[in-house]
Amino acid sequence: MPELPEVETVLRGLEQRALGCRITGVEILNAGVITGQPAHLREHLIGRGIAALRRKGKALAVYLATNGATQGDCLLIRLGMTGQVVVIRRDAPLLPHTHVRMVLNDGPNEIRFRDSRRFGRLRYCTREDLEKVFGSLGPDALDVTEKEFRDALRRRGAIKGWLLNQRMLAGLGNIYADESLFEARIHPQTQADRVSERGARALLRAVRRVLRQAVALQGTSFRDYIDIEGRPGNFLPKLRVYQKTGKPCPRCKAPIRRITVCGRSSHFCPRCQRRTRRPRANTNSR
């Protein structure tokens, strides 16, 4: 499932291949991936330039311009589980599960949106719509401050579930949550509000380090994710615990374990990531 590094890679690819281009044609092959009326989306895209791109968490906003001026409205792209955005020649074979085509500058290239499982979505957003969407998300995992991070940690529930909650911290999914917890030596079932100050700082450093390395390597590809040029990401060989059940821990050689936390598979080292049971603070004390 595309997470922050994969969406950031798509953003950077669109900046290189489509920024400044004008959308001169839109073909919607499957209206099921459109939030709102397909005709409304086409109406607001055709003739508009791609003025800028912005990401928060896993959501990608493509800002639109008319005659070089933008009103703050945008095309909002969510990749879902298997969504792909590529810039490709218009005469290239149309692959299965291609749902939307957007011609650039009446030229030889177009943007295509593919999604085999159809959980991804395209949506036209006004400035106000986008503010509501982004406002519903927690701080971006790459931009969050230490204070924001520690303040958000003050809630009950497993730390793994907290990392996956986009209203708390935007951008992490199963892959990078597992990798960050391993890096910080924190058990995925540790209660978020019982993580020590030292542990919180270690986890924030781990999140930043893992995400930045994954962005530098264009994300992780197992099957569906590809970048704007159709190439897989290069972070897969760097994974240390995710989907490594039974394999030796890269630090201590203990077998990696898999458990379910908050309904999601979680991979960890039982020796490096011991579950501590720190007493809960007495909130009634004066």
Image (spheres, helix red, strand yellow):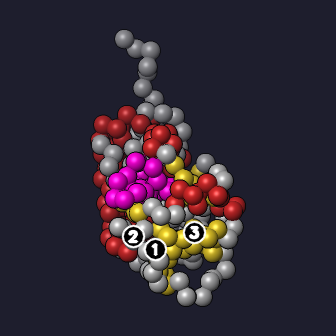
The residue under label 3 is which amino acid type? Val
Task: Give yes or no for contact between labels 3 and 1 (Cβ–Cβ under 8 Å).
Answer: no
Quarter of the rendering occupied by the C terminus: top left
Q: CA distance from mark 1 to mark 2?
A: 6 Å
| Residue 70 locus on image (x, y percent) | 37, 52
Vertical placement of 214 versus 177: above or below? below
* SS for dot 1: strand
In the rendered view, tell whether residue 205 sits above or below residue 190. Answer: below
**Mark 1 highlights which residue?**
104
According to the picture, the residue beneath numbered tag 2 turns out to be 21
Residue under pointer 3: 26
Is residue 60 within the magenta segment?
A: yes
- In this view, the residue in front, 170 or 24, is 24
Judge the density around disc 3: few (<14), some (14-19), many (≥20) Cα neighbours within 10 Å. many
> Of residues 53 and 268, which is closer to you in this image?
53
> Given the image, on which type of amino acid does mark 2 rest?
Cys
Q: Residue 93 appears in which quarter of the rendering?
A: bottom right
Label 1–label 2 contact, CB within 8 A = yes
Q: Main secondary structure of the magenta part?
A: strand
Quarter holding the N terminus?
bottom right
Q: Is residue 11 visible?
A: yes
2 or 3: tag closer to the N-terminus: 2
- Visible in this render: residue 214? no
Q: Name the kind of residue labelled 1 in the image.
A: Leu
Q: Which residues make up the magenta segment?
A: 53-77
Q: Could you say where residue 212 lies in the image, as x and y percent from the top left?
A: 32, 63
Measured in 3D between alpha carbons, the distance from the residue under mark 3 to the one under mark 1, in whole angstroms, is 9 Å
